Amino acid sequence: MNMMIINAIVAILALILGAGICYVLFRYHASGILRKAEEEAEVIKKNKIIEAKEKFIALKLEHEGQVRQAEQKLHQQEQRQQQREQQLNQKQGDVQRAQNELNTQRQQVENQQKALDHKTQEIERLQQKAEQQLEQISGLSAEEAKKQLVDALRDEAKTAAMAYINDTMDEARLTASKEAKKIIIQSIQRIASEATVENAVSVFHIDNDEVKGRIIGREGRNIRALEAATGVEIVVDDTPEAITLSAFDPMRREIARLSLHQLVQDGRIHPARIEEVVAKVTKQVEEEILETGKRTTIDLGIHGLHPELIRLVGKMKYRSSYGQNLLMHARETANLCAAMAAELGLNVKKARRAGLLHDIGKVSDEDMEMPHAQLGMKLCEKYGEKPDICNAVGAHHEECEMESIIAPIVQACDAISGARPGARREIVEAYVKRLNDLENIAMSYPGVTKTYALQAGRELRVIVGADKLSDKETELLSFDIAKRIQDEMTYPGQIRITVIRETRAVSYAK
């Protein structure tokens, strides 16, 4: 029992001793760790202080650089401000000097004006004095002398003007005639075409008299039905193998001819069939008219034309003017206009378009009491053509003022197309009337004794008395007659006016 107690006490003491040793060892180890941590903390502290100092130095240097840059910019702005002030001062000085010079010049001008006014007054005084002396010497008043001087100057100016006109016309003939003829001849050569002559009569050929009898019908019923349906007079005479279709409208004659052709080929000829065939042929002709208009515009390279204008262009195929087919005339005029516009550097498309449409008023469906040129202009305006095209159409016979550059080209090309040999045929009455009008116009001038229209109206000879007109006055007379004929008459080509101053000495031997 005691032994167990002793052992327990020894164990407790050993446990306490071990705990003390362990505590001492722990304190020693903990103090080492603490010293080591303090040393590391001191190192970190020193490093942080060094980094903070370095950062502070860097920020300080950066700030100093920014300050230096700002100072430099401020210095530059101050320099520029100083330069601007210097320039402003210089300009102000220049303005002041210019103002001083202007004032000096103004004063000089005023002084010169005063001197000039004084000299003008002195000249007027001397002129009045000289006029008074001249009136005393000459015995004429100023008004009388002025009148004599004006009369003399008028005669001299009139003579000089006529000489100048003659010289100018001669020069124009020498310089312009060659080039104008070249352009016109080139245009005609390029656009040469055959003229189709249309009459008021068409001849329908048949194989034999049996067919002629069937066309006539019983008691002439077929002929009457055909005439009523087509509006064409059908002449059946003794001419073998032929029937004559007579009408002023070429379109009606064509419908009658085609209807007869179909009736003869079909063999069924009676009034009901005639009406049916005529209606069918009329529709075919209308379609052909439209196709002809389209083909014509395509051939000429004209686009954007209104369908109604295209139809009227096709309708020209069945219309003639002075024996000249209207469609051929329109195509020829269009091509001539294009060629002439190309030579002159103008718009070729507009010139060709105006040339094609210039006679569109002749085939209008509207029956209006106005010239065909004016009617054509209204049609062009109605269907959306441009103003210069409309003006060229309306002015090609000078029935309105020419406002576009292509108007005189259309007028000239229309005259060229109609004036070439073989293009047109005039009736005798119109031809004789034109000759009489030429002679009457010339006879209306004082001093004219006789007039003769020669060369089919292409030349006019005017004979004046030698005691009534001078040589200079004859030149003026030829110019006046030419201008009046040009303004009052319509004619193809040109007319030459020749004035002859005649002197006759008559004696009798007895």
Image (spheres, helix red, strand yellow):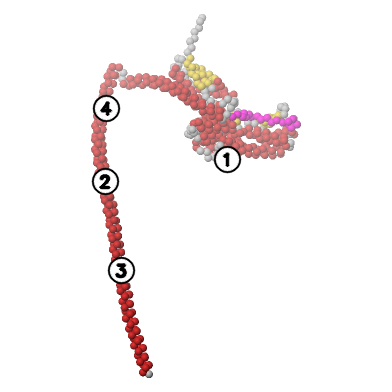
* Residue underneath mark 4: 120
Q: Alpha-carbon neighbours of circle 4 within 10 Å: few (<14), some, or many (≥20)? A: few
Of badges 4 and 2, the one in the foreground is: 2
With 361 as the anchor, is 152 left or right in this view?
left
Residue 68 magenta-highlighted: no
Q: Earlier in the sequence, mark 4 or mark 2?
A: 2
Marks 1 and 2 sit apart, C-alpha to C-alpha, by: 77 Å
Residue 83: assigned label: 2
Q: Residue at x 32, y 83 (%)?
A: 20
C-beta proximity under 8 Å, tags 3 and 4: no
Of badges 4 and 1, the one in the foreground is: 1
Of badges 1 and 3, the one in the foreground is: 3
With 243 as the anchor, is 481 left or right in this view?
left
Magenta stretch bounds: 193-213
Q: Secondary structure at mark 2?
A: helix
Residue type highlighted by circle 4: Thr
Residue 60 vs residue 197, the one in the foreground: 60
Q: Secondary structure at mark 1?
A: helix
Q: Earlier in the sequence, mark 3 or mark 4?
A: 3
Residue type highlighted by circle 2: Gln
Q: Earlier in the sequence, mark 4 or mark 1?
A: 4
* Residue underneath mark 1: 307
Residue 506 vs residue 251, the one in the foreground: 251
Q: Residue at x 58, y 37 (%)?
A: 298
Residue 10 vs residue 232, the one in the foreground: 10
* Residue underneath mark 3: 43
